[in-house]
Amino acid sequence: MTVGQKLYEGKAKILYSTDDPSVLLTYFKDDATAFNAQKRGSIQGKGEINCAIASHLFKLMEKNGIPTHFIDRPSGNEMLVRAVTIIPLEVVVRNIAAGSLCQQTGLELGTPLNPPLVEFYLKDDALGDPLLTLDRLQVVDPASAAKVDQLKSMATQINTVLQAFFEQCGITLVDFKLEFGTDAQGQLLLADEISPDTCRLWNQAETDPDRRVLDKDRFRRDLGNVEDAYRQVMQRVLNQTV
Ligand code: ADP
Ligand code: MG
């Protein structure tokens, strides 16, 4: 596999072409951003940690019948993936109220959401990734709107598998963001990444609302020990065979 040109540099990853047009190489960076890139920094070792966690979790998904873009992890920071056309939606699944849901609704942090809440945000940094209603989605992007039922069903299945997995790690899966894409055959695949950058994860051994945080909220809220938290997630995740 020969690596080709840089196609796109995002906030957390760089995409490269390869000699196979259906395959891309993603390079996971240590760069960290929050609040739509208004806050920028770096988390030492994050690229490798997130690449390891995401690879492991994609394998877990495949084992549970959920198709993903994951092919291989040829080195620490690199993941080979199937090239897809990304659906411009951020699909968010919430098991427990936190973050923007609390800010926008007044729900108290930690309120259990049963059944889990599945939300669609428009993936558009310039617009600040706004929350969509189904009717707005229909107006803005009818092609994606047509896939909403399938996306919701996949996101719910992913949640069931991930929740059970993290439970075995002694971690509560509070919420997470997913991206999906379609490959050249039109198959819907789970894409992008699943990592402490994209999930809220609480250590079940801690009750303190700050100490329990094992995800990017440590960076967002300057809670310190960000790298330690990410590393702890990686160790617990990799300890569980899939
Ligand atoms: P961003 O700053 O847009 O969040 P990232 O740093 O996360 O970007 O880089 C990854 C980019 O690659 C994202 O835009 C994501 O949608 C896209 N992407 C993820 N997986 C794939 C894939 N399999 N094929 C094509 N693009 C992908
Ligand atoms: Mg991203």
Image: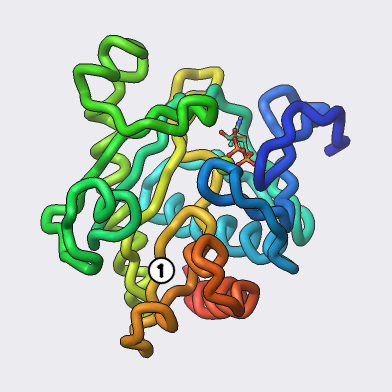
**Residue 101 image offset from top left, x and y in percent:** 26, 50
| Residue at position x 71%, y 34% in the image | 24
Can I make out residue 139 in this image? yes
Along the line of sight, the residue nearer the viewer: 59 or 178: 178
| Residue 50 vertical position relative to residue 234 in the rendered view, above or below | above
- Residue 146 is at least partly visible in this image: no
Q: Is mark 1 within 8 Å of ligand 2?
A: no
Residue at 40% in and 28% down: 122
Q: What is the quadrant of the N terminus in the image?
A: top right
Pick the front one: 13 or 159: 13
| Residue sitting at x 56%, y 57% | 54
The amino acid type found where label 1 is placed reads Leu
Quadrant of ligand 2 in image: top right
Picture residue at 48% right of the left edge, 53% below the top = 198
Which x, y percent locates residue 180?
45, 34
**Number of residues whose C-alpha sits closer than 10 Å to that of mark 1, classed few (under 14), some (14–19) or many (20 or more):** many
Is residue 57 toward the left or the right of residue 99 in the image?
right
Q: Specify whether 119 is left or right of 34.
A: left
| Residue at image mark 1 | 201
Q: Position of residue 195 (x, y in %)?
A: 52, 58
Q: Secondary structure at mark 1?
A: strand
Q: Nearer the viewer, residue 3 or 95?
A: 95
The relative height of residue 112 versus residue 62 in the rendered view (above or below) is: below
Which quadrant of the structure image shows residue 66? top left
List x then y, in percent, for residue 155: 31, 44
| Number of numbered markers | 1
